[in-house]
Image: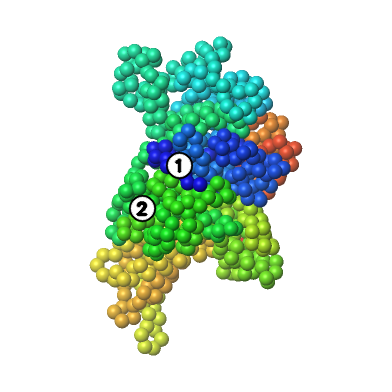
């Protein structure tokens, strides 16, 4: 079926982002049903496991979204590419990489809870990538659902610049539509499954409230444009036409610091109003600034505009293994177009590859297409060395776009195959899963020979092991979860590294002086060359740096990677005949071993930001338990629907199994979420324990 040609100004690339269980997937299902993609509304937790975008077995069983799924739908002559992202913090990289390529977002809130922990995280991620968004307060038709209280939490925790564009009609079970503040009409339904909304007069008891809310919208809209502002001052609210109001609001939303809010039942006909907001107020690819990258030949900055006439540039933002077609690479095309049979340059590796097939994705279903143009999102089948963050471009006009950064995973487990037959299959399976997921890492422990898997949390690793079993038929045994500790230094020290070897014939000679000092947290390893004259020739300085780097990776106190260290090479000497790259590499190793030991080395541990929602009667137990885990309470506040929210910081080492412990102490009524906050120094007594355990290995 040939797609109808749609102009670029009518494209929308949007993400559905939210806290876990706010109703993102259900809202996406409602959208797919309303736009005719699906003939029924799938459920996340129903017996049919029928949510289109939750197609993995693990998603159906747990009722959560694990991978971001891409779907394309059409609404009122607009083409909308939607990515339904996960809400659980362990899969936050999925949100990160989706927001990197999206132009706008719909933030979904649970109308019974308001802003939750992960709502704040995804909001921060959207701010980081400058993604304009609209807000949808879901579940306000359920007991405890409250549009206005939820809006209050948005004002309190996210932004004061969030204004309703629709007001709900009714309360909880009696919700049956919205008042649209743009055209000042009521849009109602009898049942959420109704085929269409019925336009009518605003209920008399809401008229005054609607007028006041509209006045606020007009005042904010005219701020976008001096001409509108002058018109407003001259003639008041009546002087601003509906088109001008919409234009002003759109300009405010596109600026990224103003948000329109609506609410309703994500399963129902009301999502048509959400789709209208996506069309009217979120950006098209033409509203987004040209993307910048660099020329791989001379490192100069170059840009690409969203046009098919520009040289092709696209970013691979996600990999998925499809049981029928093999490796799928999701790409966002920023300029030019990709056609089947054409050749593209992988700017990251420098290799040319041929495009075999292109597919438009509807979650796990595929539709063959012949080209992807600027501003569009689709999937390419069969590229070899393409990973998340790879730039694909026109071979004649190369460009490297900024890649996507992912945090280092803080949790590790050891894994081994149950049988010899599983050994090879496990290697292949883990390799494929690591290709798909940039926050999942694999390495072999040099001391024990064990395969170590690292991920963002216990659930993340649990899902990996589950996928190994189901998708690759590998039975594996796993060890206890381990914390990914780090080392760093708190002091400054200078050390000499001198490698001299005479063994008859040509010897080895390398001599360096290096100063070690703490770097800013998060900045990692930095090498500074301060050699004056030629005491260490230029060709030997890089081997020195590599020697330092390799030693820091293996740690000095307990064998954990040393982070946030600045190493300055400031002196040394060489021998005309005996000096070599190897000798200076080893000199760097020797200086690092001594220098780091003298620079007050410390062990760092990952500390998690924890948020617990609990009924008031269990608050004392929850706080006592957090304190017993070396945690510290940061804040407490009342929960929207009753109960308390407790926020604190707890070392990851003391959080394994916390979810089930919390369930036990609260009769299953408390819930928690956590995310990595920072690395902090371990208390001396704990540091000794860690060293002993590590040395015992």
Q: Position of residue 345 (x, y in %)?
A: 38, 60
Judge whether 502 appears above or below 610 on screen: below
* Residue ID at (67%, 63%): 474
Judge whether 643 appears above or below 94 on screen: above
Does residue 597 appear in the picture of this structure?
A: no
Q: Quadrant of residue 193?
A: top right
Q: Position of residue 582 (x, y in %)?
A: 39, 75
- The residue under label 1 is 4
Q: CB under 8 Å between callouts 1 and 2?
A: no
Circle 2: is it few (<14), some (14-19), or many (20+) Cα within 10 Å? many
Residue 370 is left or right of residue 537, and the answer is: right
* Residue ID at (56%, 69%): 446
Judge whether 531 appears above or below 63 on screen: below
- For mark 2, give the secondary structure: loop
What's the mark number on residue 649? none
What's the mark number on residue 312? 2
Farthest-out residue, bottom? 504
Screen quadrant of the C terminus: bottom right
Residue 282 is left or right of residue 121, and the answer is: left
Circle 1: is it few (<14), some (14-19), or many (20+) Cα within 10 Å? few
Q: How is the image coloured?
A: rainbow
* Residue ID at (51%, 47%): 1
* Residue ID at (46%, 30%): 259
- For mark 1, give the secondary structure: loop
Q: Position of residue 163 (x, y in %)?
A: 48, 25
Q: Earlier in the sequence, mark 1 or mark 2?
A: 1
Nearer the observer, 288 or 535: 288
Q: Quadrant of residue 36?
A: top right
């Amino acid at each position: 079926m040939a797609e109808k040609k749609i102009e670029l100004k009518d494209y929308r690339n949007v993400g559905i982002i939210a806290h876990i269980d706010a109703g993102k997937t259900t809202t996406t299902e409602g959208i797919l049903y309303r736009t005719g993609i699906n003939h029924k509304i799938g459920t996340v937790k129903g017996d049919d496991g029928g949510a289109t975008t939750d197609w993995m077995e693990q998603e159906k069983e747990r009722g959560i979204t694990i991978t971001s799924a891409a779907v394309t739908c059409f609404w009122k002559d607009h083409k909308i590419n939607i990515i339904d992202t996960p809400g659980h913090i362990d899969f936050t990289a999925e949100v990160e990489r989706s927001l990197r390529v999206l132009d706008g977002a719909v933030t979904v809130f649970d109308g019974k809870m308001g802003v939750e922990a992960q709502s704040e995280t995804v909001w921060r991620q959207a701010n980081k990538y400058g993604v304009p968004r609209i807000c949808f307060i879901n579940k306000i038709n359920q007991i405890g659902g409250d549009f206005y209280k939820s809006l209050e939490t948005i004002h309190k925790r996210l932004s004061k610049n969030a204004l309703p564009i629709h007001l709900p009609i009714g309360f909880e079970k009696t919700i049956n539509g919205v008042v649209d503040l743009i055209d000042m009409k009521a849009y109602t339904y009898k049942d959420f499954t109704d085929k269409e909304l019925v336009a009518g007069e605003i209920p008399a008891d809401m008229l005054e409230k609607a007028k006041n809310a509209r006045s606020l919208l007009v005042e904010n809209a005219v701020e976008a444009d001096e001409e509108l502002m002058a018109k407003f001052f001259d003639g008041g609210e009546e002087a601003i036409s509906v088109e001008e109001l919409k234009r002003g609001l759109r300009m405010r939303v596109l600026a990224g610091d103003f948000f329109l809010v609506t609410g309703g039942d994500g399963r129902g006909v009301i999502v048509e109003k959400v789709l209208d907001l996506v069309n009217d107020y979120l950006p098209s690819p033409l509203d987004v600034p040209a993307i910048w990258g660099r020329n791989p030949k001379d490192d100069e900055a170059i840009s690409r505009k969203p046009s098919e006439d520009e040289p092709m540039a696209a970013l691979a933002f996600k990999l998925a293994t499809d049981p029928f077609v093999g490796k799928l690479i999701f790409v966002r095309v920023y300029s030019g177009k990709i056609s089947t049979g054409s050749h593209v340059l992988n700017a990251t590796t420098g290799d040319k590859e041929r495009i075999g097939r292109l597919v438009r994705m509807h979650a796990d279903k595929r539709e063959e297409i012949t080209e992807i143009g600027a501003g569009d999102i689709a999937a390419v089948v069969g590229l070899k060395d393409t990973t998340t963050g790879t730039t694909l471009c026109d071979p004649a006009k190369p460009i490297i776009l900024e890649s996507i950064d992912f945090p280092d995973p803080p949790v590790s487990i050891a894994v081994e195959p149950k049988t010899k037959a599983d050994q090879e299959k496990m290697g292949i399976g883990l390799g494929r899963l690591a290709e798909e997921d940039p926050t999942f890492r694999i390495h072999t422990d040099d001391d024990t020979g064990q395969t170590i898997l690292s991920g963002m949390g216990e659930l993340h690793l649990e899902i990996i092991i589950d996928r190994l079993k189901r998708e690759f038929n590998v039975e594996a045994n796993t060890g206890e979860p381990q914390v990914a500790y780090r080392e760093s230094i708190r002091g400054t020290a200078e050390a000499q590294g001198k490698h001299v070897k005479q063994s008859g014939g040509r010897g080895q000679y390398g001599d360096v002086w290096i100063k070690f000092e703490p770097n800013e947290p998060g900045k990692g390893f930095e090498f500074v060359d301060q050699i004056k004259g030629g005491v260490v020739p230029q060709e030997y300085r890089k081997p020195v740096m590599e020697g330092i780097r390799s030693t820091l990776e293996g740690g000095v106190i307990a064998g954990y990677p040393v982070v946030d260290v600045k190493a300055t090479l400031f002196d040394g000497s060489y021998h005309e005949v005996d000096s070599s790259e190897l000798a200076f590499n080893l000199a760097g190793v020797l200086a690092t071993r001594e220098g780091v030991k003298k620079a007050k080395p410390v062990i760092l541990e990952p500390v998690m930001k924890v948020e617990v929602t609990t009924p008031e009667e269990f608050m004392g137990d929850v706080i006592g338990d957090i304190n017993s885990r070396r945690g510290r309470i940061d804040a407490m506040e009342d929960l929207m629907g009753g109960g308390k929210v407790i926020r604190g910081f707890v070392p990851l080492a003391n959080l394994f199994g916390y979810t089930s412990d919390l369930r036990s102490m609260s009769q299953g009524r408390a819930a928690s979420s956590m995310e990595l906050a920072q690395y902090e120094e371990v208390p001396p007594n704990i540091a000794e324990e860690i060293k002993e355990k590590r040395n015992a290995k």
